[in-house]
Amino acid sequence: MYPIKFDVIVVGGGHAGTEAALAAARMGRKTLLLTHNIETLGQMSCNPAIGGVGKGHLVKEVDALGGAMAQATDESGIQFRILNSSKGFAVRATRAQADRMLYRQAIRGRIESQANLWLFQQAVDDLIIRGDKVLGVVTQLGISFFGEAVVLTVGTFLSGLVHVGLMHYQAGRAGDPPSLSLAARLREMQLPVGRLKTGTPPRIHGDSIDYSILTMQPGDDPVPVFSFMGGIEQHPPQVPCWITHTNEKTHEIIRGGLDRSPMFTGVIEGVGPRYCPSIEDKVTRFSEKTSHQIFLEPEGLSTREVYPNGISTSLPFDIQLKLIHSMRGLEHAHITRPGYAIEYDYFDPQNLKSSLETKTIENLYFAGQINGTTGYEEAAAQGLLAGINASLRSQGKDAWSPGREQAYLGVMVDDLVTRGVSEPYRMFTSRAEYRLMLREDNADLRLTEQGYKLGVVDAARWARFCQKRDAIARESERLKSTWVNPRLLTAGAAEKVLGRQIEREYSLYELLRRPDVNYESLMMLDSSGAEASDPEVAKQVEIQAKYRGYIERQEDEITRLQQYEALRLPEDLDYATVKGLSAEAQQILNRHKPETVGQAARLSGITPAAISLLLVHQKRGFSGESVKISA
Amino acid sequence: MPSADTIAAIATSPGRGGVGVVRVSGGGVEALMFGILGKALEPRTATLCRFFDEAGGAIDFGIALYFRSPHSYTGEDVLELQGHGGRVVLNMLLERCVALGARLAEPGEFTRRAFLNDKIDLAQAESVADLIDAATQRAARSAVSSLQGEFSKRIHGLVSALVNLRMLVEATLDFPEEDLDYLEANDAAGQLEEIRAHLKSVMDAARQGNMLRAGVHVVLAGRPNVGKSSLLNRLAGDEVAIVTEIPGTTRDVIRQSIEVEGVPMHIIDTAGLRESDDPVEKIGIERTRQAIGKSDLILYLADSVTGLGDEDGKILADLPDLPKVIVYNKIDLTGALPGIAEDEAVYLSAKTGEGVDLLKRKLLERVSWQPLGEDQFMARQRHVSALADAEACLARAQADVQPEIFAEDLRLAQAALSNITGEFSSEDLLGEIFSRFCIGK
């Protein structure tokens, strides 16, 4: 037995585990991070990129709550872009190629220098459970660690099975061993378990690529920054990505190998993601498309390896070689690592509370790929939340999780716990009802204050945040109270800034809401006064003004729905006693035990009729007495 | 559903002869069946039985039908006893059911249970209620069509066109790195226009349907002795007038409900609008004023012998600003021909009936009634306003430049329609996207 008793034990050193451990330690809890290999802390095991639409939003939220991912990306990003930059602010998203090694360093550095955080290398084989409560973990060498709460972030390593062609072997990600004994132990605990699949492309040696005939894709200029605390000066040197395409010949080669594809011959049972299909999937399902775009992404500054994004495959190696060589610029490419598909276990997240604690075992939290999600960003965000809630539990405090209207993190967790997954879950902005409110640019305004109260946001971030928040409020107020008089406005200035003369007095704020007016042009009016010195403040004031009508409408909608979110359902309610509920609804509700009426309403298979019965039942105080159905 | 209590009611309307039906639904049906029939019936098989009383004597003799849960109207166990139609016999049967553990059903409770057990959707449940209170034959036909899901079908068609468009927008927003412009490539603007046209036709039909259900409120005004009562009788005329009073608080305001070409028209008489100090009468006057304010149309009756005089002007000035139809009565005295003048005034004789058809046509025209034939369906005000909300969102969407705002307006339009059809999740939307497009680097 290890001599120190911990508050929080985190198992797994990937993106979920590291954020969980860092968050718990920031909250002042005595935290242990157990990983089977310290060298791979913060490893990007799939493509070397962070962010994107929906995912970038999550990274900004993790950052707003003091997490490491955005800052680590600023220190390791070698190509930054803003996606959707021609569209509105709500859907603009940051994406960066990262140098794998620099990213690992950035994460490991933070882990090693974090106060209250103990790092230990040992694979975890077992959980110590008494009754329905977890007390600690046992490692491969038989060392027992005890802690108040345990966060499991063991992702792809659970019963991993790698497929290349019809060959397969047991493994974890990227050459690591799978966690077999832990998976077996969890299976013994009768937690609802399922199987998913994901894949990677073969990697290529950069020197064997003919870049001279390929399209270059440079990063944005000026170079974007990920963290609210970050700066351009943190970025390492920047490099471009390159674009090539598959062609008819490539597709012919792929079709020729389908008889040896583990997916098409039924060897793989796990369900793969529809939004990230393997190339053999794309070619068969969308046979009318004669070409697919392939991004050649550099793996880092100190390696020549290239990640060809868009041709994830588990076809046999000889087919992989041929299909690579069929593409422009890759005619002589040398494959450094074959592509593969990997199947792994996940636990049905419908067995989780929105704090990410399991419903079956007290003080045990799950985060990341183990919950059926995919992606570093999704994992990091869950890790952070699990770390926060494990810490709160160890302090005897109530759990916290953001609402769907507050954060993409809230949307994701709610989706997971109410609807489960049928394929690896990835964030998309279309999953959010309140997309116009959940923007990258206001992630700090949405979450940093909450983070400060929880103790995951440090003093420096808090001070900078307060300054920005107050400056935004001041500038908005100034624009609302500064009036532009048509008599004092020259025709020329009106024409130039507003398109035409105004017919009455308007405040600057009202003028800013017009579609053709922006902050910068508005400030050219004589009556505009001194503009905000911080461009971030100016930008935020403008965005808020532009979206205001829509956001007010969304706020109304939220207020209407909030009442259901506030109605808590008792954990021990037997839904068979709610009269009038259909047998199916009873079953679903008894299986899920939703925490609130709002959650119940989002369960699949629960009808508005069932909810109205719950409301009637709830009004009666869950006394179990019969509910009279009145006409 | 064994947990639900058992309800019973006489299912046929009172006072009719022929067959009378007692319907029972709930968890206690099986036991009740033994009690009243002395045996268990095969489900869904019409069986000739004796209906026994407590002492084992026969109350009646008829057909019994048993539907086992969930294959029944309510989704629960249901027993139908079809006896002879007499009131006394039916009441005895009902009392027997109550003695065997059932309780009397509240109005609409069978349908409510059918809805709660997902046997019918909300639109269907509402149209059953409409069928029961359908005021006229045409309304009854239309309610049947809605129950069969005509309305739901039209709305679902609308929703799936909207989903298709949303899918394009959402794919554009969430997958910017695909080398495709989904909106351009699929003529999003054209699609939106088509959806709006479709929505407009559903709205028109729904408005008509709502008119059929709720009727049109018409204020009948004019000086004394211009022939208001005779005109009313004339309008009610050949088709069977429904002279039942409208229940509730409007009772003392509305004098009569008539039917014009199948459209129920509730006539509000302004006779009560005179000066009064009597407190009770004052309340009545206030109510009449409120009813007038909420009506759809004013029918102003004048005397064609005297024409519109000062007194008419005073009365008209006192009425709210609503669409008006001016009618000159008594052309039998002036010898004028029945007809519609250039100022849209109608000339007629309530006494001879000449020109009354013209007035009917005019009334229907002024409330925008268009006979739509069998296409009609019963809509509720709730449906009409949900459709109007959706249309407002789509009108905004047409002007949107930014795709994320466009997406938001489409989402709101769909949310409005969801009030009629039920929820649609983002997961469903993503499913549409992935089945249509090759997504993913």
Image: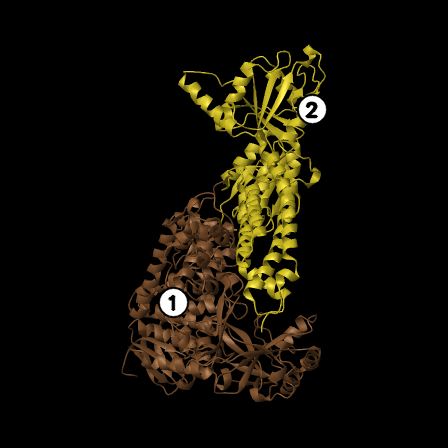
Chain colours: A brown, B yellow
For the image shown, how many numbered marks are present on the structure? 2
Above or below, A568 against A328 in this view is above
Give me the chain letter of mark 1.
A
Which mark identifies residue A279?
none
- Residue B16's image quarter? top right
* Residue type, label 1: Ala
Q: Is residue A215 left or right of residue A102?
A: right
Give me the chain letter of mark 2.
B
Above or below, B29 against A350 in this view is above
Dot 2 crowding, Cα within 10 Å, few <14, some 14–19, many 20+: some
- Residue A207's image quarter? bottom right
Query: Looking at the picture, how far across and down is residue B381, in whole percent?
Result: 55, 39
Query: Looking at the picture, how far across and down is residue A206, in whole percent?
Result: 56, 86
Which residue has dot 1 on it? A64
Which residue has dot 2 on it? B358
Instruction: Quote the CA–CA distance across marks 1 and 2.
Output: 72 Å
Residue A220 seen: yes
Q: Secondary structure at mark 2?
A: helix
* Residue type, label 2: Leu
Contact, mark 1 vs mark 2 (Cβ under 8 Å): no
Q: Quadrant of the N terminus of chain A?
A: bottom left
Query: Looking at the picture, how far across and down is residue B370, in whole percent?
Result: 67, 35
Query: Could you say which is closer to the camera, residue B87 or residue B108?
Result: B108
Query: Looking at the picture, how far across and down is residue A561, in whole percent?
Result: 44, 52
Dot 1 crowding, Cα within 10 Å, few <14, some 14–19, many 20+: many
Residue A336 seen: no
Residue situated furthest top in the rendering: B333
Q: Give the mark toward the camera: 1 or 2.
A: 1
